[in-house]
Amino acid sequence: MAKIIYTNDNGNMVVITPVSTELTVEEIAAKDVPAGKSYNIVEDSNLPTDRSFRNAWIFSDDIIQVDMTKAKDLMRDKIREVRKDLLASEDVTFMRAVETADADAQAASAARKQALRDAPLASAISNASNVTALKAAWDTSLLGANPYN
């Protein structure tokens, strides 16, 4: 089945799946793609099956690829989103350690908070050369369940 793709104003690829049997794919594109936007018609089989970094898709050389720079930024943003609650929880742990004057617990909590702050800068993210490697860069021991699996 043919799909219509174009890049929206946010830089994300939009995929339109025609459902009308009364209009051609070209007629649907003329109707549904915003004025002034160029589009391409691709076969469904040419869309990546892994949608983990869907907002990093680009159309280049007649194929849909993942822009790894953008995918890495999406991964870093996801880490920042997840770590927000983890940092808040760790603040509670740290304050309890302060209240009980537990220096070891304070040091452990401070180290965990620093690790959370450093998580977006992990070399595994920077060094990932493909989506599989990038998905594997998620630190489950620090951040919990991997949202990309």
Image: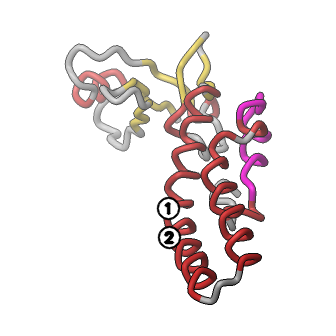
Please tell me whether mark 1 sits on a helix, a strand or a loop: helix
Residue farthest bottom in this picture: 100
Q: Is 59 within the magenta?
A: no
Residue placed most toward the observer, 25 or 133: 133
In the image, what residue type sits under mark 2?
Answer: Ala
Vertically, is 115 above or below 2? below
Label for residue 88? 2
Image quadrant in which you'd find residue 133? top right
In the rendering, at what x and y percent does residue 124 appear?
A: 78, 39
- The reply to whether discs 2 and 1 touch (Cβ–Cβ < 8 Å) is yes
User: What residue appears at the point 64 percent right and 34 percent down from the top-left corner?
Assistant: 45
Residue mark closest to the camera, 2 vs 1: 2
In the image, what residue type sits under mark 1?
Answer: Lys
In the rendering, at what x and y percent does residue 129 appear?
A: 77, 28
Distance from the alpha carbon under mark 2 to that under mark 1: 6 Å
Label for residue 84? 1
Residue placed most toward the observer, 85 or 107: 107
- Report crowding for label 2: few under 14, some 14 to 19, many 20 or more residues within 10 A (C-alpha): few
User: What residue appears at the point 54 percent right and 32 percent down from the top-left corner?
Assistant: 56
Q: Where are the magenta residues, as a range?
A: 126-139
